[in-house]
Structures are given as structure tokens and as C-alpha cells.
Image (cartoon, helix red, strand yellow):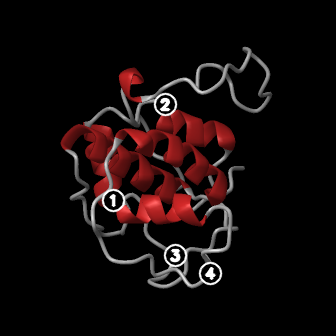
Amino acid sequence: MRRLLSLLLVLATVLGLVSMTALAANPFIDVPKSEWYYADIDHAYQNGLINGKTPTEYKPNDYLTYAEAVKLAAAMNQRYITGAVTLQNGTPWYQTYVDYCKTNNIIKKDYVWDQNATRAGYMEIFADALPSSGMKEINTIPDGSIPDVPMSH
């Protein structure tokens, strides 16, 4: 399974392509400025890609659920394509993001949305979140070197 914090390291790379906008200050009381990951979380929050688990808690050590992954994939795609994230929560909260991802061919199936995402499931969702031109290669991973993630993902 993928920790939410690991996801933000990927985001920091992707967000290098997008300029920051002036939004409200990072509200997360559990993400102190002294932590090494503060800037990544702040950057993702300022760009409208993430919310906290509550209005004041991010919970950086929690696992990423499929609902959170699809929200992030939709937000990343919309921000990349249009320059802004305008998607809003629906009912249930993640439905707007699921619909957006299906409409834009980011996902092809439903997941158990409140279940923790596996690394393979995470990769399956994010494989089509951005066009290949939007992802610069930062390293090379030989085929088959990540045993729980099939190359098709």
C-alpha cells in the first residue's frame, strides 16, 4: 500500500510544471513547518489538489484510499489541462471526481472507494491522469523490478 506522503513526492515533481496560485494558508495543524514534507503538502494544497482528512488535519501517516486517489488524479488532470481545479465534492464526496475520471478516460472501472489503495491500484489510476508530455522522467525502473506492480499498470 502507498502512504499518502509518498504520493506527495510524486506531486512535487508534477507540480513543477504548474505555477502556484495565492490561496489561503495551509491549515493543517499536523503538518508542522519543521517537517521535511511540509513544502510538498503546502504546494499541493495551495494548488487545489488536496484537502485534509478534516478541515485542520491532513494526517500525513494515513494510507491513501481509492477515493482520495481518484480525487487527486482528477484534480491533477484538470489543473494540467485548464490551469485551475474547479471540481467540487459531490454525493458521496468523491463521486464528482469518479465521474470526471471516467469521462476523461483516466479510470476504466470502479474501485472499493473507501478501501486503502494498493500500489498497483494507485498506478492504475494515475497511469492516465496526465499525458506523457506532462511527466518528465526522473529515473528508470527496470521492467519487473517492482513485484507488486505489473508493467501494464
Residue shown at 29% from the left, 70% from the top: 23
Residue shown at 37% from the left, 46% from the top: 76
Instruction: Report the mark closest to the observer, 3 or 1.
Output: 3
Upstream in the sequence, badge 1 or badge 2?
A: 1
Asked if marks 2 and 3 touch (Cβ < 8 Å), the reply is no
Secondary structure at numbered mark 3: loop
Secondary structure at numbered mark 1: helix
Upstream in the sequence, badge 3 or badge 4?
A: 4
For residue 95, which numbered disc appears in the image?
1
Instruction: Please state which amino acid type lies under the numbered disc 1.
Output: Gln
Real-space Cα distance between discs 4 and 1?
27 Å
Upstream in the sequence, badge 2 or badge 4?
A: 4
| Quadrant assignment, res 43 | bottom left
Quadrant of the image containing the C terminus: top right
| Quadrant assignment, res 37 | bottom right
Q: Is residue 124 left or right of residue 15?
A: right
Image location (x, y in percent) of residue 134: 38, 29
Secondary structure at numbered mark 4: loop
For residue 127, which numbered disc appears in the image?
2
